[in-house]
Image: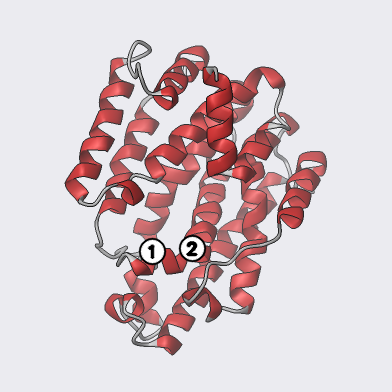
């Protein structure tokens, strides 16, 4: 299997929605987008592939070394090779990638998210930067005007995905719902993680989903004027409102099982926004 096919298969299995979104991009840009998404999947799964935080930090440091070294680095890792080719081909800035790796250290430990501002900063350095870089790949000129849009997209996308997979995070002792939100609804991180206060946890999930919906609404308003050439970069966020709406309707259920929507519904949302934008 050649490198391009390997990366495409990796993204198709690891993030089907992002894979489908690349099919709406110009063919000459798809490989680069897939390389960026493969990198996001790879570093996003570090916590799941290590037993100790130090081992995860070593993996993230390896990625830092690769990115700082440049186009000749990453030999032997298909994802690293593809990413560095993409960076070189489109002159992508490296600092946002390094900032993403720094932010991902949070994933390796069980410290609770301190505040809403910290959460939004985390989403900005992890999810938002992927939207921004994808936009740069599609059209560097048009991408200059969508940094704020990428911020809301990243927050909506990340919060929706954290909320819908909450049982997995709680099972390993992680609390991504910010402490100030937990305090406001009358509970705390240990009670949430240990499921000792189901009513408080349900209120926390509702407030968390509301925060995601707030960013999704802000994104939708700004996306009305998005240049059509950039739509494929932002298509993955199209599913966030559907996830958040389902969580808001049944917040208690997400404490026990992940939330999903049917593949047909997800594909329809991606197609509709690819064709019509967010008008």
Q: Quadrant of residue 259?
A: bottom right
Q: Position of residue 137 (x, y in %)?
A: 57, 24
Q: Residues within 10 Å of mark 1 (few under 14, many from 20)?
A: some
Q: Mark 1 touching mark 2, by CB under 8 A? A: yes
Disc sitting over residue 165 in the figure: 2
Q: Is residue 216 left or right of residue 267?
A: left
Q: Residue at x 62, y 44 (%)?
A: 16
Q: Residue at x 32, y 32 (%)?
A: 98
Q: Is residue 117 left or right of residue 232?
A: left
Q: Residue at x 44, y 77 (%)?
A: 204
Do we see residue 93 in this rendering? no
Above or below residue 278? Residue 214 is below
Disc sitting over residue 230 in the figure: none
Which residue is at the front of the view, 162 or 54? 54
The residue furthest top is 72
Q: Is residue 119 left or right of residue 30?
A: left
Q: Position of residue 106 (x, y in %)?
A: 28, 52
Q: Residues within 10 Å of mark 2 (few under 14, many from 20)?
A: some
Q: Quadrant of residue 183?
A: bottom left
The quarter of the picture where the N terminus appears is: top right
Which type of secondary structure does the marked residue at label 1 adopt? Answer: helix
Above or below residue 106? Residue 208 is below
Which type of secondary structure does the marked residue at label 2 adopt? Answer: loop
Which residue is at the front of the view, 42 or 215? 42
Q: Is residue 185 left or right of residue 65?
A: right
Mark 1 = which residue? 169
Q: Residue at x 30, y 75 (%)?
A: 189
Determine the CA span between mark 1 and mark 2: 7 Å
């Amino acid at each position: 299997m050649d490198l391009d096919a390997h990366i495409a298969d990796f993204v198709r299995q690891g993030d089907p929605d992002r894979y489908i979104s690349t099919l709406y991009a110009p063919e000459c840009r798809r490989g680069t987008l897939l390389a960026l998404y493969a990198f996001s999947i790879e570093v996003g799964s570090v916590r799941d592939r290590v037993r100790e935080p130090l081992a995860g930090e070593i993996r993230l440091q390896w990625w830092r070394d690769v990115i700082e070294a440049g186009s000749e680095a990453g030999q032997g890792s298909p994802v690293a090779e593809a990413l560095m080719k993409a960076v070189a081909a489109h002159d992508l800035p490296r600092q946002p990638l390094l900032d993403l790796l720094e932010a991902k250290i949070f994933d390796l430990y069980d410290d609770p998210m301190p505040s809403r501002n910290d959460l939004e900063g985390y989403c900005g350095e992890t999810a938002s930067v992927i939207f921004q870089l994808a936009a740069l790949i599609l059209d560097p000129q048009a991408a200059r005007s969508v940094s704020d849009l990428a911020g809301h997209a990243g927050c909506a996308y990340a919060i929706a995905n954290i909320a819908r997979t909450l049982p997995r995070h709680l099972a390993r002792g992680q609390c991504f719902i910010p402490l100030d939100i937990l305090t406001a609804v009358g509970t705390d991180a240990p009670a949430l993680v240990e499921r000792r206060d189901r009513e408080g946890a349900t209120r926390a999930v509702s407030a968390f989903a509301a925060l995601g919906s707030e960013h999704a609404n802000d994104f939708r308003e700004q996306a009305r004027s998005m240049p059509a050439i950039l739509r494929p970069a932002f298509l993955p966020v199209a599913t966030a409102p559907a996830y958040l709406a389902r969580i808001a309707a049944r917040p208690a259920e997400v404490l026990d099982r992940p939330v999903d929507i049917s593949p047909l519904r997800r594909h329809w949302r991606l197609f509709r926004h690819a064709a019509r934008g967010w008008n």
